[in-house]
Image: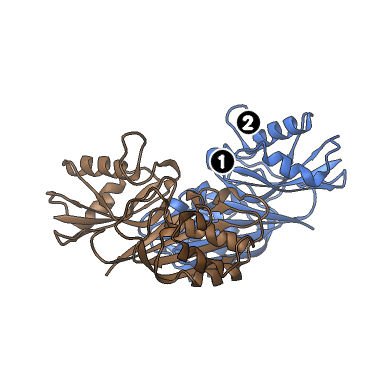
Chain colours: A blue, B brown
Amino acid sequence: MRVCLTVAYDGTDYHGWQIKPNGITIESVLHQALSDLLGEDILLIGASRTDAGVHALGNVAVFDTDTRMPAEKIAYALNQRLPGDIVAQDSKEVAADFHPRHCLSQKTYEYRILNRRFREPLKRRYTYFYHYALDVDKMQRAARFLVGEHDFKSFCSIHAEVETTVRTIYTLDVKKAGDEVTIRVCGNGFLYNMVRIVAGTLIEVGNGRLPVEQIDEILAAQDRSAAGPTAPACGLTMVGIEFL
Amino acid sequence: MRVCLTVAYDGTDYHGWQIKPNGITIESVLHQALSDLLGEDILLIGASRTDAGVHALGNVAVFDTDTRMPAEKIAYALNQRLPGDIVAQDSKEVAADFHPRHCLSQKTYEYRILNRRFREPLKRRYTYFYHYALDVDKMQRAARFLVGEHDFKSFCSIHAEVETTVRTIYTLDVKKAGDEVTIRVCGNGFLYNMVRIVAGTLIEVGNGRLPVEQIDEILAAQDRSAAGPTAPACGLTMVGIEFL
């Protein structure tokens, strides 16, 4: 059967999702734990191959197995074999041809900025500490330019190889609660580093270095150097995926 | 001059506040960093000597120094010498006879319970994971019995040596937001393990093992064994102290 696994992780101590020759990754830990649990060599297909240091509340991976264990029990059994910073949240059987990257989906990411005078140790792993003042209203106005179908080439790391750089952002909200500014984005897919470049650019608007209206020009430029910097990985969390 | 330092820390990797012969503590790290910074042997007087694994957003310590550095600058300079899990939040000069444990104060603690089906890695260091159902309304009603001046002997670890076990709780609130149940308590002081025993007892009310009204009997018993278990340290955060 094909099993769809939902997984949450603290990415701080990992070299990202994807298995690499050197360095421990989320996928390598899941591969080992699932293979041990099911007594087979389990190959995972991840929905979002998050970067080093990026977190997830609901990333998704599918795998095939001959096990007689009910699919719903796998998450519980797997958690007995996983470290505290990777936790399965759900497991269920899906159609044998279900592929999490080849079907329509809606992904949600959150970028959390800790905006205060001093660092806060309880949030240090999950937020980007930024102590200059941010104008959240300007950031929200700038965000509106990015909603919809656009060519996001300016918001894509230059070494990425993709067929098209056109993506659709359904919603992009900037909210302040206490000393945290959260950028929440929902779209049909994101280019390499796209959410972090969007965050880095909105921060440049928030601190006054970029005028709100320039977002339109940055989109039109189709040039990575037109946008702001790539915000640090620690602030980014893959919230979840909805398959349509 | 006497300096009052406010400090936040992630207590996960420390053996509590107080300097011990073995094991690294918050006080030992602050002692070393302050002594290096100011070129003197700096002795700290802590307001709340939190246990191993307990966190703080605003614990307070005072110390005397001959430095010519302005008191307000010490927090910034100190943070250059502290690890990421201990961060000074403020420093200011106070009266030479100010003692954070010998004056009237109001302390606030929060106990965070993660109440859901699976663990959540981003909250694992700062919450107690409890997956059985909790009746928050019952917990709130039980909490009301503890508000006011009482002899909290039943809520004090038996090996504690104190003059009196009478304390005043000003407010004690139990709130649910999403999958988190937070117990927030404000009082004029707390006995050894008192907040964690209050949390452990309210959890026993929430899961139905203790009737709401039994809290009154537990108080009257003046016996540690009458109350619920001591909830784990990881869920506890010292929020702040107000000196009156």
The furthest residue to the front: B221
Q: Which mark is residue A52?
A: 1
- Residue A105 lies, in percent from the top left, at 75, 55
Q: Nearer the viewer, residue B155 or B40?
A: B155
Assign a secondary structure to mark 1: loop
Residue A12 appears left or right of A89: left
Q: Residue at x 16, y 42 (%)?
A: B40
Q: Amino acid at mark 1?
A: Ala
Q: Chain of mark 2?
A: A
Image location of residue B182, percent across then percent down: 52, 63
Q: Position of residue A160 (x, y in %)?
A: 63, 42
Q: Amino acid at mark 2?
A: Lys
Vertical side of A212 occupied by A126: above or below? above
Q: How far apart are the two marked residues, 2 and 1, measured between alpha carbons? A: 11 Å
Label of residue A20 in the image: 2
Name which residue lies at 77% across and 29% down: A41
Q: Residue at 46% across / 69% down in the picture?
A: B146
The mark that comes first in sequence, 2 or 1, is 2
Q: Tell me, yes or no, if residue A173 can be seen here.
A: yes
Rate crowding at label 2 as few (under 14), some (14 to 19) or many (20 or more) other CA atoms within 10 Å: few
Q: Residue A113 in the image: state x and y as whole percent.
A: 48, 57
Residues B60 and A58: in front is B60
Front residue of B114/B9: it is B114
